[in-house]
Amino acid sequence: RLTSLVKGLGKNVMLKQSRTVSAEDMKNHNVILLGSVWVNEWSGKDLINEDFGSGASATIVNHNPLPGEEREYWAKFDGETGRLIEDYGLITIKPNISEKNTVMVLAGTHSEGTEAAAEFLTSEEHLANLNQRLLSLKRPSPKHFQVLLKVKVDNGIPTIISIVTVHELHSDR
């Protein structure tokens, strides 16, 4: 879905496994990373203060909670079957290591959250909702930000995806 979206915009796309992404890729190209720091070492490389990050127990930690927000977001499981019924996904748009290009990180507390983040970005309806939220933060829309998503899961499939919150990110430099 992501490669189709980018190709539809007339851009060239190179798809790589995260373990084969090099420092040169991170410096000289726009990059989309799938997965949290647990599966993708580049996800945690920051030139920017991130409000959300991966917690030690497969959670998403909110380092800068706004009113009404939680400090930590946990996936939920069915008490009888043990199946995942609710997950969280995180979309992070930040500068790459040279600050000339952009890195997009799509991560979930589980695979379903990561999948939902990619689905969210390839849906016109979800993108329209996100654009409205970004415009409510600042005009023009912020260049770097994080979007926390809540994901209902049915039998291993993300079904309902909704925005929990959007935070603008600010460069450390």
Image (cartoon, helix red, strand yellow):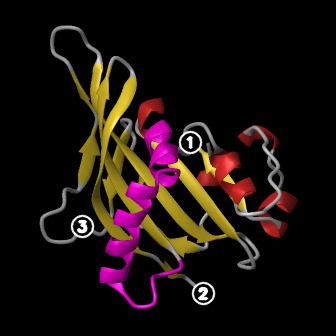
Question: Residue at position x 18%, y 61% from top?
Answer: 69
10 Å crowding of disc 2: few (<14), some (14-19), many (20+): few
Give residue 62's position: percent from left, percent from top: 31, 59
Residue type, numbered disc 3: Pro
Give the Cα distance between marks 2 and 3: 23 Å
Give the Cα distance between marks 2 and 1: 26 Å
Question: Residue at position x 55%, y 38% from top?
Answer: 38
Residue type, numbered disc 1: Gly
10 Å crowding of disc 1: few (<14), some (14-19), many (20+): many
Residue carrying label 2: 173
Is 126 magenta? The answer is yes
Residue carrying label 3: 65
Is 117 magenta? The answer is yes
- Please tell me whether mark 1 sits on a helix, a strand or a loop: loop
Q: Quadrant of residue 112?
A: top left
10 Å crowding of disc 3: few (<14), some (14-19), many (20+): some
Question: Residue at position x 30%, y 81% from top?
Answer: 136
Question: Residue at position x 32%, y 72% from top?
Answer: 133
Question: How many callouts does the rendering have?
Answer: 3
Which part of the image, by quadrant, shows the N terminus?
top right
- Residue 98: image tag: none
Residue carrying label 1: 35
- Please tell me whether mark 2 sits on a helix, a strand or a loop: loop
Q: Which residues are magenta?
A: 114-143
